[in-house]
Amino acid sequence: MFSNYLQNDPLLPNDAQLDLKRIPHHIAIIMDGNGRWAQKRHLPRTAGHKAALTTVKEITKAASDLGVKVLTLYTFSTENWKRPKSEVSFLMSLIATSFKTFMPELIANNVRVFVIGELTGLPPKTLATVQKAIKDTANNTGMILNFAINYGGRDELIKAAKDLATLAVNQQIKPEQIDEQLFAEHLMTAQLGQFTDPDLLIRTSGEERISNFLLWQVAYSEFVFSKVLWPDYSPAELKANIIEYQSRNRRFGGLKKE
Ligand code: IPE
Ligand code: IPE
Ligand code: MG
């Protein structure tokens, strides 16, 4: 279906199928398949993570050029600590070193870095680089690039519940004041302002599960599953996934718009 379009320059604005006026404001991506990409090439899994970095840069640029407001990238889950120590430490140092090379591009594209996840759990060097990236891009006014690092949806919900319970015990709020809006204000995504909930959730590599990502926020997101392994994912594939999103009818529990 998209073969014709895939042969074109992936960012050609005159692409007939893509409606540039209906680009999803918030796209969240579960970047999956790095290990399988490497294994197919008889390379260590870490080679897949390294290759993934190039894709992160390309997709950030493509999303920013398309006018996406928030791009959330699932980078490391609270469950990923179960992996072999060597893979975990490779990933943690890759995060630290990659921010250094990524920064000039982010500044040039006016991209602002945010992070969701339990940052105190990160190795000091990784934490310092992440905090520096947030600080150094704080004045940028373009797309928000939101990395989910040591992030778990259940962990986030428990933290919100704890915060609200503490406020109630200290009599700063009454339990009956807790509604959807107040609850959402205590989630890690509250910093994203008006675009906390993804319009489009993409998972690469053919897996079709949520893996503890943004459990609250995806209540009405459109899900698109791409067969492509993350290191092979491209701006053309992103556009194809957005076209798929644009073909959906979002009803939010109401009735189909004519
Ligand atoms: C995604 O790729 C990256 C992280 C979860 C950090 P994987 O490492 O999960 O790759 P597969 O799923 O094993 O192929
Ligand atoms: C989800 O991928 C986490 C990230 C992409 C960071 P996983 O590869 O960890 O998920 P499962 O284990 O296949 O569900
Ligand atoms: Mg995986």
Image: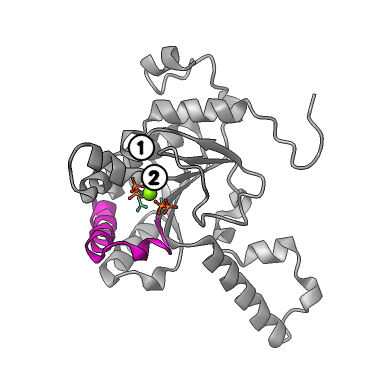
Q: Residue at x 59, y 60 (%)?
A: 190
Residue under pointer 1: 229
- Check whether the beta carbons of the residues at disc 1 and disc 2 lie within 8 A of each other: yes
Who is closer to the viewer here, 151 or 12?
Answer: 151
Q: Please, what is the three-letter code of the amino acid marked with disc 1?
A: Leu
Q: Residue at label 2? A: 32
Would residue 109 appear left or right of 183 to someone viewing this image? Answer: left
Q: Is mark 2 within 8 Å of ligand 3?
A: yes
Could you tell me the amino acid type at mark 2? Answer: Asp
At x 74% / y 42%, what residue is drawn? Answer: 252
List x then y, in percent, for residue 133.
35, 57
Question: Seen in the image, is 201 located left or right of residue 5?
Answer: right
Q: Which residue shows up at 39% across the image and 22% down it?
A: 10
Q: Residues within 10 Å of mark 1 (few under 14, many from 20)?
A: many
Q: Pinpoint residue 80: horizontal percent, then vertical percent.
A: 37, 61
What number of labels is visible?
2
Write the residue at 59% across / 56% down. 215
Image quarter of the C terminus: top right
Region rendered in magenta:
76-101
Indicate the position of residue 23 as horizontal and vertical percent values.
56, 31
- Most frequent secondary structure within the magenta stretch: helix
Within the image, what quadrant is residue 88 found in?
Answer: bottom left
> Which residue is the extreme one toward the left?
43
Residue 8 place in picture, x, y as percent: 38, 15
Q: Would you say residue 88 sits in the magenta stretch?
A: yes
Residue 134 in sight: yes
Q: Earlier in the sequence, mark 1 or mark 2?
A: 2
Label annotation for residue 176? none
